[in-house]
Image (tube, rainbow, N blue to C red):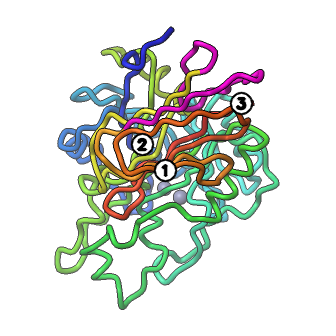
Amino acid sequence: MLEKQNYFEYSGIIHIHTKHSNDGSGGDFEQVKTALSKTNVDFCIITDHNSIEIKEFYGEQIYNNCTILIGEEITPPNKSHHLLALDITNKITATNNYQENIDNVNNQNGISVICHPNIKRTIFILRDLSWSDWNVNGFTGIELWSYMLDWTKELNIFNIWLYMLFPHWVVKEPDFDIVQRWEEINNSRKCPCFGCVDAHILKLVPFGFNKVFTYEFLFNTIRTNIITLKPLTNNIDDNKKIIYNALKEGVSFMINYEVCDKKGFRFFVECDGKLYTIGDTIELNSKTAIFTVQTPIVCEIRLLRNGENIASTFDNELDYICSLPGNYRVETIYSHRKWIITNFIYLR
Ligand SMILES: [Zn+2]
Ligand SMILES: [Zn+2]
């Protein structure tokens, strides 16, 4: 039987824009690397709007133990329904046919992630960026939590300076409606969530109130951590397989590093002498499942089944025994803010 310590945890930053996004709101590759070296990141994925040019210039690489991968944010000509395309080989030309964009990612065996699905037009976001066409199918996952765009949701000319100074007041948890939709989709198929930064960098912000628009700040906010059976190596191709496999299979959880930056979270189920973790499907066959949640600090731990809270504690471990089928996930709260939200373990 696998031992719990045989798992590795790696912390990733997904959805970074650079100047190759051509919307005037990204830095250059060196700025990304400088911020990475200061923020203790194991992997990151750059996704420029309709461009993988940065891969052609610099290539995917390992820098200071951080695996830097390149995807694309497919941004249709009508600027609506953005889609992250990860683990792709060739650039995908965006169309206003959203299903075609998803299919084009899948045709490359890539990972397609619906972006910022509930971001409506505001005084600063001049277009409705939400995803309204839910008749599409075949997408891999959903960007459930997006730091930059969640930060803009209620921004106006009166509160912008407060939002700049105290962004942690604003970005507290993912949008409730989208969480519900994500839960519903997972009733019929696996659909992992992704925690992203959507890092846009502005060079000119008046009076220096610009910390929200720096890579260094954003890289210490919402991340996606993966759990793997193999360690990352010095080989970019091996790492790419390990990272993308974990993301595709949802062996991952969203974590807000602004709340707490400690690694060591684990969510396991033991059933019939075998050990399972996030992303796994377990055939119960009338057996009992023993859940274990471990956190590196004392915090509020909640275990949810089909979206309902079934057990909670304020501790650094929660144990729970049950034999009911359902989709199980964990949320943790620290300092009155959501800290970790996991993908599901599926009991059938
Ligand atoms: Zn976008
Ligand atoms: Zn973006």
Q: For numbered disc 3, what is the local secondary structure?
A: helix
Kindly indicate whether the residue at mark 2 contacts the one at mark 1 (C-beta within 8 angstroms): no
Separation of residues labelled 1 and 2 (CA atoms): 36 Å
The answer to whether residue 17 is visible is: no
The answer to whether residue 206 is visible is: yes
- Image location of residue 148, percent across then percent down: 41, 63
Label 2 is placed on what type of residue? Ile
Kindly indicate whether the residue at mark 2 contacts the one at mark 3 (C-beta within 8 angstroms): no
Residue range of the region highlighted in magenta in the rendering: 271-294
Which dot marks residue 107?
3
Q: Is residue 262 above or below residue 241?
A: below
**Earlier sequence position, callout 1 versus callout 2:** 2
From the image, tell me which residue sits under label 1.
312
**Earlier sequence position, callout 1 versus callout 3:** 3
From the image, tell me which residue sits under label 2.
46
Which residue in the rendered view is the most extreme toward the top? 1
- From the image, state whether disc 1 or disc 3 is nearer to you: 1
- Image location of residue 32, percent across then percent down: 28, 45
Label 1 is placed on what type of residue? Ser
Which residue in the rendered view is the most extreme toward the bottom? 158
Q: For numbered disc 2, what is the local secondary structure?
A: strand
Label 3 is placed on what type of residue? Asn
**Earlier sequence position, callout 3 versus callout 2:** 2
Q: Nearer the viewer, residue 224 or 137?
A: 224
Residue 141 quadrant: top right
Separation of residues labelled 1 and 3 (CA atoms): 42 Å
Q: Is residue 280 above or below residue 105?
A: above
Separation of residues labelled 3 and 2 (CA atoms): 21 Å
Which residue is located at x 47 percent, y 62 percent? 173
Q: Nearer the viewer, residue 292 or 45?
A: 292
